[in-house]
Image: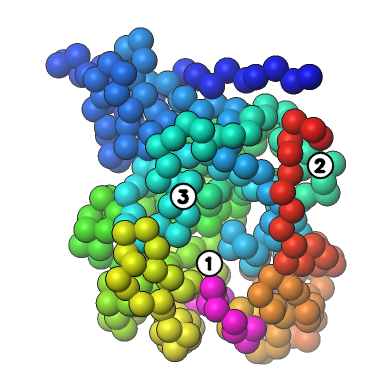
Amino acid sequence: MKQNIERIHTTKYWHQLDDGRIQCDICPRYCKLKPGQQGLCFIRENQNNQVVLTSYGYSSGFCIDPIEKKPLNHFYPGTSVLSFGTAGCNLACRFCQNWDISKSREIDTLSQHAAPEDIAKAAQQSGCRSVAYTYNDPIIFLEYAIDTAIACRERNIKSVAVSSGYICKQPREEFFQYVDAVNIDLKAFTDRFYWKLTGGHLQAVLDSLLYLKKETSVWLEITTLLIPGENDSQAELENLTSWIFENLGADVPLHFTAFHPSWKMMNKPATSPATLKLAREIALRVGLHYAYTGNIYDPASQSTYCHHCGQILIGRNGYELSNWNLKEGKCNRCEEMCAGHFEQNPGQWGSRRSVVNIPQV
């Protein structure tokens, strides 16, 4: 029988302040903590005059998902990914779509426990190509995520992060050296939006995107949740997509996903399919090679096309793959390279979602 894992784990990204408090330096919120006080994220706390992670080895649950659900459309399409998260978050998004996990301040949310080595073993035995740190932001459980990523590498399992990118320079450099692919949630392209609706700032996220693209080999995709009347104007979409094209290049896939009323924004309507399709058209017109819609039924806008000859390369209906016209990562018609990481044949996981009990693996 497995023994419980010690939840409390020492950390290193903090420093002492002159007034006796400790400042957490994991993210640009820079929470200043009195003894016994938790940061906004809930799982980093001042204990014994140091910041500790209080959820090491504990999760809100483990599931096997399609990699396209992260969403990652250019990272081993069709394969399965073992996904898990903890509780809490370092942003305060009023529109959070995973609020039951990310906004939880109940330790009972962390109902399952597993050592990093057990997670890697479970992923391998389940046939997963990768492990994803998701549901809430892995930045706040960085130490647990890194140890898991190290264990995964020993078994040739890739590591995927789904993150807001709201992280400071030093922990960012440490974290992403263990990550193989990431989807960054670029929530909007105005600081007004970030401050009003998330409690954060845009520039820190842009800094992470620039770092990932220019200074790492991490495969990068971006998601923007479009909220009616908040970040879906044509002008903002043109600014956002132009910035990506000019600073990150044409090959970074961009996903526009539909908002549904949630958490503290129940008064907003769901995003219309027309808005998502317009956003995709703007991205393609600006020069991005790969733009997608999500959270709606739209196979045409969720499939991957050759940016040179227009042939469909990867057909998608939700999380199910249909067409596959790639050969060694190239279009089999014109031989133009498709950016991403591909195997000779697509995975066959489909749209299944399977709950995993790690301790019983």
Q: Earlier in the sequence, mark 1 or mark 2?
A: 2
Q: Is residue 70 magenta?
A: no
Q: Which mark is residue 124?
A: 2
Q: Which mark is residue 252?
A: 1
Q: Is residue 298 magenta?
A: yes
- What stretch of residues is rendered in magenta? 287-300
Q: Earlier in the sequence, mark 2 or mark 3?
A: 3
Identify the amino acid type marked 3: Asp
Observer-side mark, 1 or 2, equals 2
x 54%, y 21%: residue: 7
Q: Which mark is residue 100?
A: 3
Query: Alpha-carbon neighbours of circle 1 within 10 Å: few (<14), some, or many (≥20)?
Result: many
Identify the amino acid type marked 2: Gln
Identify the amino acid type marked 1: Val
Q: Measured from the top left, where is residue 116 in percent x and y?
A: 67, 30
Query: Alpha-carbon neighbours of circle 2 within 10 Å: few (<14), some, or many (≥20)?
Result: some
Viewport quadrant of the C terminus: top right
Q: Measured from the top left, where is residue 32 in percent x and y?
A: 24, 27
Q: Measured from the top left, where is residue 42 in percent x and y?
A: 38, 34
